[in-house]
Image (cartoon, grey):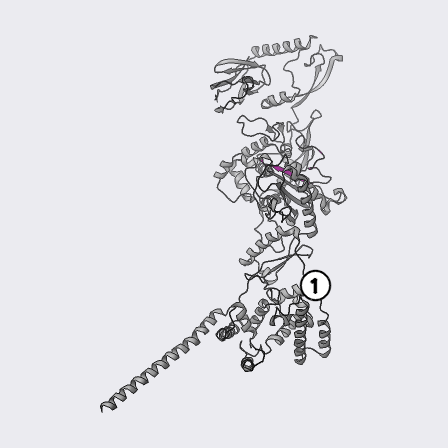
Amino acid sequence: MVAWHSNRTGGRREALSIRQTLGRLALVGLVLAVVPAGVAFFRANLEAPPPTVILRDRYGRFLAEVGSAANGDAGYWPVAELSDKVVAATLAAEDRRFYTHPGVDPRAVARALHQNRQPGRRRSGASTLAMQVARLQTPTARTYLNKLMESLTALWLTARHGREAVLRHYLRIVPYGNRTRGIGYAARRYLDKPVADLSWAEAAFLAALPQSPAQMNPLTPSGRAKACKRAEGILTVLHRQGRLTDDEHQTALSRLATLSFPKPPSRDESAIHVILHLERQLTTCLTEHRCPELERRPIVDTTLDLELQAAVTRKVRARLHEWQPDGAGNAAVVVVDAPTSEVVAWVGSGDYRAEEHAGAIDFTGIKRSPGSALKPFFYALALERGELTPATVLADLRRADGLVRNADEKFLGPMLPRQALANSRNVPAVEVLERVGFGRTWDFLGDLGLHEGARRGRAEQLGYGMVLGNLAVSLEALVRAYTVFTREGELHDLILYRGQPTTPMRRLLSSETVRQVALFLADPAARLPTFPRMGASEYPFPVAIKTGTSSGYHDAWSVAWSQRLLVGVWVGHPDYRPMRSLSGHRSAAVLARDLMFLLPHADAHGLDDVALPPPRGFHPARLCGLSGKLATSACEHVSLEWFAPERMPQDTCDVHLRHMVDKRTGFLATLATPVSQRLERTFVTLPAEFAEWAASEGLPTLPQVAYSAGAAPEVAARKSLEAQALVERLIPREVSIHIQAPRDGMRIVRDPESPDDAATLGLTAVVKPTTAAVVWYVDGQPFATVRYPYTVRWPLQSGEHRFQARAAYQSGASPWVTVLVE
C-alpha cells in the first residue's frame, strides 16, 4: 500500500510538471507570436526622408541638387501618378501576384523554402513589395526572425494603407544604385526625363536595377549589360502576360540595346553660396511641411539666371584683383529684378575655395557697418511724417556739441533734402533723425527688417550712430529693405524660387515718398560737390544710387536701382581690416555700375529704359538751393522739386538780392554815384545761423548802409561801420543772441604737446537781426569786439570759464555758457 501510494504521488507530480512545462511553452509561444506582431504593428507606417530637390535656373537650366537623407542617399521623390509601364515592369520583376496576396505571398514563400533546401541552388527570398518596404524602412540582418518581422510588418502595411499606397511608397524609397532612391529621381538621374515619358524599354531597364543595384550599375559598361539582360527577361514576362504586343516587344528589345545615358550635370561653381542658401531655405520649408507643392514635385525653378550669375562672379573677381593691393579681401553682390523682387544673381564671395580670403563665408548674410547706406530710410520716414518737404532747408554746419562731423570735415551750409541726401552729409542727416525722433526711427528700421525687434532702449544707446553706420546689417537684409523704393513703398521678401513661402507684403511708405527719394538719389547734379560728375555714380540711363563707407574704411557699400533692377554690393576684408581709402563711391559703386552695364536693360545706352517717375499728381517747381523758395534769376543753384498741388511753394527767394553798388567802394550806390561807377551785384542774405559759414565761403553779403562819397575804400568801409553804429544808437532795438559754440557744460582736455598759441577755442554766435558788432565776455570781462559773422578764437586757459555775447550798440545778450578746460 505504501509503495502504491508512493507511485501514485510521484505520477501526479510528474503530470503536474508536464502541464507546467507545456503552459510555459504555450506562454512563450504566445509571446513569440504576439510580441513580433505588436512590434510589426507599430512599424507599419510609410516613412521616407524629405526628397532631394533639383534646382534649375529661371530658364530651366540645371543648377544643383540639394538635400540628402542621413544615410547619404538622394532621391525619395513622391510618386504623384503611377505610370502603367513602370507599375507593370516593377511587378513583373519583383511581385507578380501583388494584387492577390495580403502582403506576403504564400506561394513564393513555399517556393523559396523548397529552393533554399536544394544544394547548389540560388537562394530565393520570396520578398513581396510590402516586405521590401518593411526592410528598407528598418534595415536589419537577414535572419529567419527578421524575415518573420518583415512578413508581419508587410501584412500590417497592406491592411492599414492599401496596396496602391504600398506600391507608391516602394517606388519612392527603393534603391536604383549610385545612392539613388525612387523611380522618379532615378528616371531624372539616369535618363533625364520624367517617369511619365519612359518607354517600355526604359521602364524595364529601371525595374531591373533594385534586385542588385551595385552589380547592375548603369554608369559602368558591365553593370549596364547585366541590367539590360534582366530587362530583357522583364519584357518577355510582360509579353507573355499580354501587356506587350509582338511589335511592342520587339521594339522595346531593340531600343533596350541602344539606350543612352546622358552625363549627369554638375552644379555651377559660381553659384555655390546661393545653392547652400537655397538648401537651408528648402530644408526648413520641407521639415516644417510648409511646402506641399515641393513635396509633390521636388524640382525647383529658381529665379536665378546662370549666365548672369557667372558674369557677375567674373566681374567681382576682376575688381577684387584690382582692389586687393588696397586691402579689399572679398565682396558680395545681390542683383534683383526690381518689379518682382526676384533674385537673378547672388554672389556670396569672390571665390568659394579661396581660404586665404574666407571664401567659404557667404558675405551676403554677414552683418557689417553700413556707413551711410541707411540714410535714404531716414529721409523717407521724415518725408512720410511731414517733418520734411523737398523745400525744407537743412543746416550742414559745425554742431556745438562736436559729436557729429562730415566725412570730408567740411560744411556746405544750407541744403535742401535732395542735396543733403545725395551728398550723404552726416550733419543734416542727424537733424533729420532729431526731427523724427529716435524711437520712431528705431521702430521703422525694425519694420524694414534691419534689426531684430530689440527694445527702444537700444535706439538711445546707438543715438546718432543709427545714421552714422553703427547699426550693423547684412547685404541681404539691406537689399530687402530697399525693395520699399522699388515696389512703391511696399516691403517684399527677396524671392529665390517659384512658390517660395513669403511673409505678407507690408506697406511702410507711400509711393509719393519713395518716388521723391529716388529722384533725389538719381540726380547727378545734386551730388555735387561731394561726388564728381561722370564718376561711378553717374549713368547714361536713370539710376538712383546710394553709397556707404564705414568708419576707417572697413566696409564699402552701394545700392543702385532703376525701374528694372536693384543691385546691392558690399566690399571689405573678412578680418575687418581697414582698406586704404576704398570708399563706397570708389569701390562698391564702381562694381555696381559694372553690373548694371552687364544687364540687358543697359543696351542702346539705356535709351529703351524708362525714367524714374515723379509722384503721381505732383507738379514741378524750381527752387533756390539756399532758401528753399521759388527761384529767381538771381539764384545760382536751382533744383526741380515736386509738390502736391495744394502744397506748391508760393514765396520767391529772398536770400539772393540784386542791388547797384559803387564800383569804387563796393557799398550800395546812391543817387550821387555816377552811372559809370554803378554795377549790379547779387548779394546773399542768409539767416543768422549761417553767418559764420557764409563768411568762410566768401559769399557777398548786403552792406548794412549805403555810403559812397568818393572816399578811399578803407575809409568808406570805416565810415560805413561808424554810420551803422550811429544808427543803432539812435534807434534802439532788441537783438536776440545765442551762442552756437561752445556748448554749455563742455569739458575740454588740452593737448600738452600743442603750442600755447595753437590751443584755442572758437566762439560763435547767432545774432537776429544782424547788428554792427558783438562783444564777447569771458569770466565777466570784455574779451573781443567783433563784427559780422561775430566769430573769434579764445586762447585756452585751465579752469572753469564763463562766456557771453552782447550786442555792442543795442540791448541784447546771450545766456552764459560754462566750459571746463583741463
Q: Please report the residue visible at 60 percent of the width from the left and 42 percent of the height from the top.
A: 510
Q: SS for tag 1?
A: loop
Task: Depth check: give the residue in front, 388 or 670.
Answer: 388
- Majority SS type along the magenta span: loop
Q: Give, as a single range, the part of the protein colored magenta.
A: 530-550
Badge 1 amino acid: Pro
Which image quarter: residue 683? top right
Compared with 487, 741 (above or below) is: above
Compared with 282, 20 (above or below) is: below
* Number of numbered discs visible in the structure rendering: 1
Badge 1 density bin: few <14, some 14–19, many ≥20, Cα 10 Å: few
Which image quarter: residue 282? bottom right
In the shown orientation, is residue 616 left or right of residue 107? right
- Looking at the rendered image, the quarter that the N terminus falls into is bottom left
- Residue 669, percent across and down? 70, 13
> Can see residue 489?
no
Residue that carries the numbered disc 1 in the rendered image: 262
Task: Depth check: give the residue in front, 509 or 307.
Answer: 307
- Residue 89, percent across and down? 64, 74
- Residue 361, percent across and down? 59, 47
In magenta segment, residue 537: yes
Compared with 735, 381 (above or below) is: below
In magenta segment, residue 206: no
- Residue 145, percent across and down? 48, 74
Which image quarter: residue 290? bottom right
